[in-house]
Amino acid sequence: MKNSKLAWGILALSAGLGLGACGGGDGGGGGTAATGAKSVTVGTISAFGSIYVNGCKYETDSADIYVEGYIGSEDDLSVGDVVEVTGPTNCTNATATSIKFADELEGVVDSVTEDGTGTVTSMVVMMQNVTVNSLTTFENDVVGSTLTLNDLDTLTNPVVEISGLGIGSGDIAATRIELKALTLADYLSDPDNYIEVKGVVSSHDGTAQFNIGSLVVDYGSHPAILDGMSQISDDLYVEVKATTYTSGQPLVAIEVELEDDGVIGYQGDHDEDFEIKGMLTAAYDSNTGIFGINDQKVLVTNDTDFQDEDDHSDLIINLISNNPSVGMIYLEVEGHFNADGVLLAKEVELVDEDVNDDSEVTGTIDTLSPGAGPNIGTIVIGTNTFQVTNNTIMEDETYSEARFNFTHLSTGQTVEVYYDPATFDAATGSYVAIKVERKSL
């Protein structure tokens, strides 16, 4: 029997998934093994060569891979996709038994917001608020186009696919954005394509309309097919499909499908081991011992181990308790589910207390030093040294290598490296690379 969880109201919604914490596979730091025979991990794909999720390398040869509920393959997955991986509890030389991916949104861009440097920081996509930062990966699927993420403001209502972290209330932190088509007409020229939005039903009028965030969905004008349910009601988690959209107007649905039995997020079995990495979405409540990470309710107990480099548990408690809307707080939680579907936290680790203070360096690679695995090593750019780990997001903007990782880098190539200055190790004179983008061959 599966357990359900409550969706969370967002107190702090910020961009892409920060990386760090759980090591594992190929010398990446050794993930913490849980107590069961298998566990479930939710996080973003950081690199390939098999796949890397939350610092663990998973072999995929014998895995059942599902994309939007249909049988797929590793070729259907991309860096930045948020996936659910089932595999052994120890991620050293792990073999995944199943991998599941589903996007958050596929729709028309209403507007794009940039900072003073012309960098996209947020978008509104079919009335859903999408936040973006330097950790968000981007892919251009339009044949012959060289448009980048920061060019989206030059287009009129393009169609994008968003993978990310959302709790169904109209706010999504994008971990990956893919440009699908320059216009909705281009996108719908393939009869198999639809625009799609997922979320939790709110403000249902009882007959023909409801909201997903600020988006009004009209399912009575068509009327829409109701797939998996006899009627619609508030708090159900659904996916809406449509073929027309006008910004500011109700989305006329052709189908409303019940998603995951109507419950947003992972539904864990009692005592199932679970690991999740993501953003703080509800502050820690000292009265209940509960906080929210993504769409998951987490309960802190006397047995919870808080981990950071100084082993100060109060630092994390204070951070997630007080004014969580300041900055972008990322955590990793390991634990197991109780009978009520609440994740009992065995370990809580702070990944990045504010991704806004992360820095970047662009330059040519002077020196490469391979490490103990395909995605482990050292990059030297001028006077800066960066350690690449299994947690480092590896993005190839040359599109020359679909299964990109550290082994595909060479001296003389231009890369952009994102890092947290707080990771500086005086002993080695190096930073930990959060993300590496290859710019040229």
Image: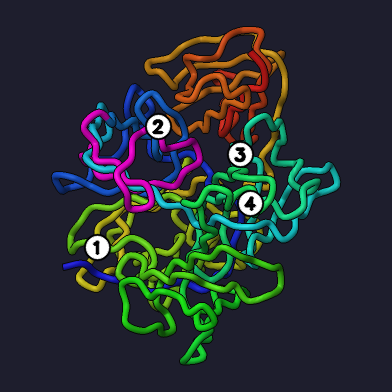
Disc 2 to disc 3, how far (Cα)?
17 Å
Q: Earlier in the sequence, mark 2 or mark 3?
A: 2
Check whether the beta carbons of the residues at disc 3 and disc 4 lie within 8 A of each other: no
Q: Nearer the viewer, residue 397 or 183?
A: 183
Q: What residue is pinned by disc 1?
A: 337
Find the distance from the CA under tag 4 to the CA under tag 2.
22 Å
Q: Position of residue 345 (x, y in %)?
A: 32, 59
Could you tell whether 431 is left or right of 73 in the image? Answer: right
Query: Which numbered marker is on residue 383?
Result: none
Q: Which residue is mark 4?
A: 159
Q: Mark 1 against mark 2, which lies toward the viewer?
A: 2
Q: Amino acid at mark 2?
A: Asp
**Residue 221: x %, y % from top left:** 54, 82
Looking at the rendered structure, the secondary structure element under dot 4 is strand
Residue 75 marker: 2
Name the outermost residue toward the bottom: 206
Image position, residue 242 (x, y; %): 53, 65
Q: Is residue 353 visible?
A: no
* Three-letter amino acid code of the residue under disc 3: Phe
Q: How is the image coloured?
A: rainbow
Q: Residue at x 68, y 50 (%)?
A: 183
> The residue tagged with tag 1: helix, strand or loop?
strand
